[in-house]
Amino acid sequence: MIDAAEKNGKLLMIGFARRYGSDTIILENFLKQDYFGEIYYAKATYLRRKGFPGGWFGDKERSGGGPLIDLGVHMIDLTKYIMGNHKPVSVYGATFHKLGDRKNVIGRGGYESAIKSNKDPFNVEDLATAMIKFDNDSVIAVDTSFSLNIKKDTTDLQFFGTKGGAKLAPELEIYSEQCGYMVDTSLVAPTALDFTTLFSNEINHYVDCLMGRAQCKSPAKDGLEMMKILDAIYESAETGHEVILK
């Protein structure tokens, strides 16, 4: 797809919607002021207790994988983007198939695909974990699940820098030092992700790029790099060894 776009002089943009979220825009304002210093470590978490959507999501031939490629991809990309979009150099990962789709559990999980059948298989992982290292020595730790014995579903992004840290989701919290004291900061302005503007921001940016008013924030090369990371995590999980990315 990248080759075809370049050959024909067209823009190919990847739908990394979380890059255009209201919470991301606020955090970027702090990043531009170097508020956090060097962000050298981050944790990206998207865990569901009973959150398998059903249908093709559990069929590896159609989905490509489970929660890692469905949920984790968004968390990894946003974390990588916030940290400066550095080049990944190595990956260590593990996947588990322990609880499955939890059809035996009474009650809805709240996540259902539009089309599903009792014949749909569940042959993907129900939990994935990984550590991704980048060429500036920064590291992202990832945890994501469809099924896990936890108290409640959790979406959490944490960033750790030399001058400060931040937690993004559900609200933005900032941690730093001031006047010799450790300080926790919360904004007066709303900082939770606003889904009503998320996709319109993305579409408007794409139009701006086509009209020559902006440089694309989520180019196709980032999508290709993300697929290399996901493939490496699955390869590491299968072989039990670290995978070096070239």
Image: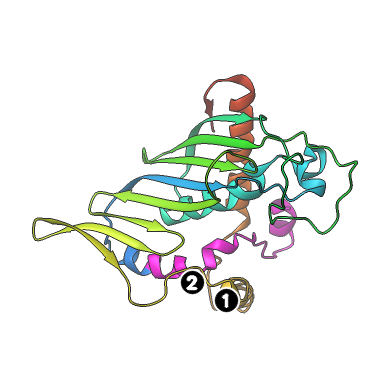
Mark 2 is on which residue type? Ser
Q: Residue at x 12, y 56 (%)?
A: 181
Colour convention of the picture:
rainbow
Query: In the rendered view, would you say 193 is above or below 227?
Result: below
The circle on residue 1 is: none
Is 24 one of the magenta-colored residues? Answer: yes
Residue 201 in view here: no
* Residue on which disc 2 sits: 22
**Left-right relation of 222 to 43:** right
Query: In the rendered view, would you say 64 is above or below 171?
Result: above
* Residue on which disc 1 sits: 197
CB within 8 Å, label 2 to label 1: yes
Q: Specify few, some or many for label 1: CA neighbours under 10 Å numbering under 14, 14-19, or 20 or more.
A: few
**Left-right relation of 17 to 84:** right
Q: Residue at x 22, y 54 (%)?
A: 163
Q: Residue at x 60, y 47 (%)?
A: 48
Q: Residue at x 64, y 61 (%)?
A: 15
Q: Specify few, some or many for label 2: CA neighbours under 10 Å numbering under 14, 14-19, or 20 or more.
A: many
Check the image and name the residue furthest to the left.
180
Image: magenta residue range: 1-28
Q: Secondary structure at mark 2?
A: helix
